[in-house]
């Protein structure tokens, strides 16, 4: 289904709206004007109208709720929290102009996006996952479960919901387990496995993709979830004519100690009790042009940030797309993995 299936005009009749509610089977429709959210109509609204013996030929505008619940794109990661708070079946996600970009549904956590971003996605899935030991003694990091499915499947599902259908998994450690899992599940997207015979770092494995990708592509680590509008990131990347766009998040950390500044004479110069510092950090997701794949030395171990620095020194345009801290989930360490599970409402 597409977002447009859930949008109605306020001038249609209640009878027409009822037919559409039956068709989408999601208990809610959203009233829009010029593509902008202006109201909502639920099956409960229709029931109450019928019980009042309202005319079914009446226009939707006679009964629609013109103060609907919604969230902005920057709060998309908190959609499930808002669904609980408002006790609604579905929540539209809107941009700053109130255009509906996606709809989050309560019963199946589905996000339906009108954006169709069909570009290749490369996922670095070959690392040892040493920070997640002892979990990774048994499972490769991409298969560590967050709820009922592994982290790599969560990542793929989010890109797939935005229209991406072609995935490249660069695999090494316990690669046969990864292949076996994805070969067994039902899926309507394509996975290409790229075997890394020796560790090539977070960037070197891209050299194994020479001749396979000829368009802008997404590169992602296999231990992060980015709750953002990927189409919007892509448009920014193309509009700015970047060679690489690094998706970065604001991060705030409260230091649990008093911080003392000492002057040259050994005296205390300043004191700050448990200060909070904020900074911009790399999330591990990028938009990039295929040129960087073709120009990589084959079988050379290199980190992707080093590739970025090389092109930056050469004068190529490297951009940053900032997102909120709530839009980034990282499971690189056990405590962060537990926070991710809680954020996704998988309390184990």
Image (spheres, rainbow, N blue to C red):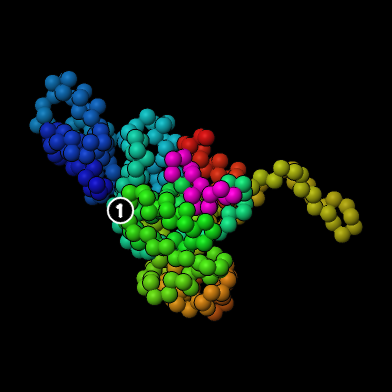
Q: Residue at x 34, y 45 (%)?
A: 111
Residue 324 shows in this picture: no
Q: Is residue 141 magenta?
A: yes
Q: Which residues are magenta?
A: 136-149
346 shown above or below 299: above
Q: Is residue 201 magenta?
A: no
The quadrant where residue 67 appears: top left
Q: How many marks?
A: 1
Q: Position of residue 238 (x, y in %)?
A: 39, 68
Q: Residue at x 43, y 44 (%)?
A: 149
Q: Nearer the viewer, residue 30 or 81?
A: 81
Going by the image, does 48 lie left or right of 294? left
The quadrant where residue 24 appears: top left
Residue 9 shows in this picture: yes
Residue linked to disc 1: 188
82 shown above or below 270: above
Going by the image, does 92 lie left or right of 171? left
Callout 1 secondary element: loop
Q: Residue at x 33, y 51 (%)?
A: 187
Q: Position of residue 235 (x, y in %)?
A: 37, 63
303 shown above or below 251: below
């Amino acid at each position: 289904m597409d977002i447009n299936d859930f949008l109605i005009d306020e001038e249609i009749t209640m009878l027409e709206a009822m037919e559409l509610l039956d068709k989408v089977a999601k208990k809610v429709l959203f009233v829009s004007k010029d593509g902008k959210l202006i109201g909502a109509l639920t099956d409960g609204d229709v029931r109450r109208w019928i019980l009042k013996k309202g005319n079914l030929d009446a226009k939707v505008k006679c009964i629609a709720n013109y103060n609907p619940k919604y969230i902005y794109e920057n709060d998309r990661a908190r959609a499930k929290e808002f669904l609980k708070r408002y006790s609604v079946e579905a929540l539209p996600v809107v941009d700053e102009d109130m255009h509906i970009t996606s709809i989050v549904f309560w019963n199946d956590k589905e996000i339906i996006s009108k954006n169709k971003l069909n570009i290749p996605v490369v996922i670095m899935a070959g690392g040892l996952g040493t920070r997640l030991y002892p979990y990774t003694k048994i499972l490769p990091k991409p298969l560590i479960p967050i709820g009922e499915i592994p982290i790599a499947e969560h990542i793929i599902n989010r890109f797939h919901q935005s229209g991406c259908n072609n995935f490249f998994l660069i695999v090494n450690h316990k690669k046969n387990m990864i292949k076996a899992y994805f070969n067994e599940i039902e899926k309507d997207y394509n996975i290409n496995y790229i075997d890394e015979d020796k560790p090539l770092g977070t960037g070197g494995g891209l050299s194994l993709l020479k001749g396979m990708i000829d368009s802008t592509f997404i590169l992602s680590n296999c231990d992060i979830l980015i709750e953002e509008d990927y189409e919007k990131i892509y448009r920014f990347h193309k509009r700015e004519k970047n060679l690489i766009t690094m998706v970065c998040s604001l991060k705030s950390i409260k230091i649990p100690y008093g911080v003392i500044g000492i002057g040259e004479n050994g005296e205390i110069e300043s004191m700050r009790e448990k200060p909070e510092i904020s900074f911009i950090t790399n999330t591990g997701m990028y938009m990039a042009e295929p040129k960087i794949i073709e120009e990589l030395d084959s079988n050379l171990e290199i980190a992707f940030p080093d590739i970025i620095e090389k092109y930056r020194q050469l004068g190529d345009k490297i951009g940053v797309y900032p997102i909120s801290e709530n839009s980034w989930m990282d499971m690189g360490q056990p405590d962060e993995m537990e926070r991710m599970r809680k954020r996704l409402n998988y309390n184990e």
